[in-house]
Amino acid sequence: MESYIKQMPEMEVARNYLALSKEFQDLQLYRKAEKTLLLALEKLPNHPFLLTRLTNLYLKLDMPEKALNMTNRLIKFHPNLSFPYYLRGKIFEEMEDSRKAMYDYEKALTESKKDIHVLSRLISLMIEYGRAEEALGLIRDYQTLLMKPYMFAELEAEAFLQLGKSAAAFNKMRDAILNEPGNKRLVTWKR
């Protein structure tokens, strides 16, 4: 079996292990899913998809220390990938270390539409920790970049309120609601 695995292309081997671990996870056989991924990492050390799956498994099992170890390993061997920084930010946020979470969320940004989920976490934390001015700058940058002037309208209004600019917050929400009158999230926004 060992020689057969060496002959298979790396991606195919990883795909097979990932599929097997997913089956175990779907059956709630988490220990077997973990063992499968650890075995795969013996065959393909530091493979980014395997490390990511193992990190997510540890997060699901509420094992943030192990998840953090896997994510650190992922970042060490694949520093140019952005998603490991998002994962580590999520772990730090779960561990209630918001400063480190914000730092990693910032490193996860790619200046593309793929950043929307990361941005919502980062901007919320920035506002929560008194960095409203920076949050507003980031919101404006992405509104311009993605050509969506009402993206993150609620968070923008929150930042304005934190800065004591209630009229600007009101105007932002009013304009967002007028632009999207059917958006229930905007209509029911509460501070």
Image (tube, rainbow, N blue to C red):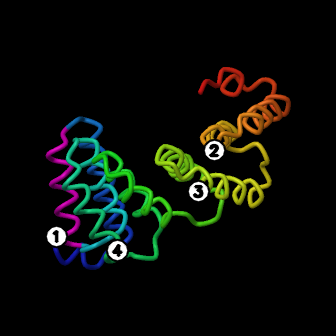
- Residue drawn at the location 71% of the way across and 34% of the way down: 166
Q: Position of residue 38 (x, y in %)?
A: 18, 61
Number of other residues with Cα within 10 Å of mark 1, as a class: few under 14, some 14 to 19, many 20 or more: few
- Residue drawn at the location 79% of the way across and 47% of the way down: 149
Mark nearest the camera among 4 and 1 is 4
The mark found on residue 1 in the picture is: 1
Tell me whether the residue at label 2 lies in contact with that at label 1, contact meaning CB atoms closer than 8 angstroms: no
Q: Which residue is mark 2?
A: 163
Task: Point out the stretch of residues depicted in magenta.
Answer: 29-43
User: In the image, is 180 to the left or to the right of 139?
Assistant: right
Q: Is residue 101 magenta?
A: no
Whether 78 is drawn above or below 144: the answer is: below
Residue flagged by tag 1: what amino acid is it? Met
Please report whichever mark, 2 or 4, sits nearer to the chain's N-terminal start.
Answer: 4
Residue flagged by tag 3: what amino acid is it? Asp
103 or 4: nearer the eye?
103
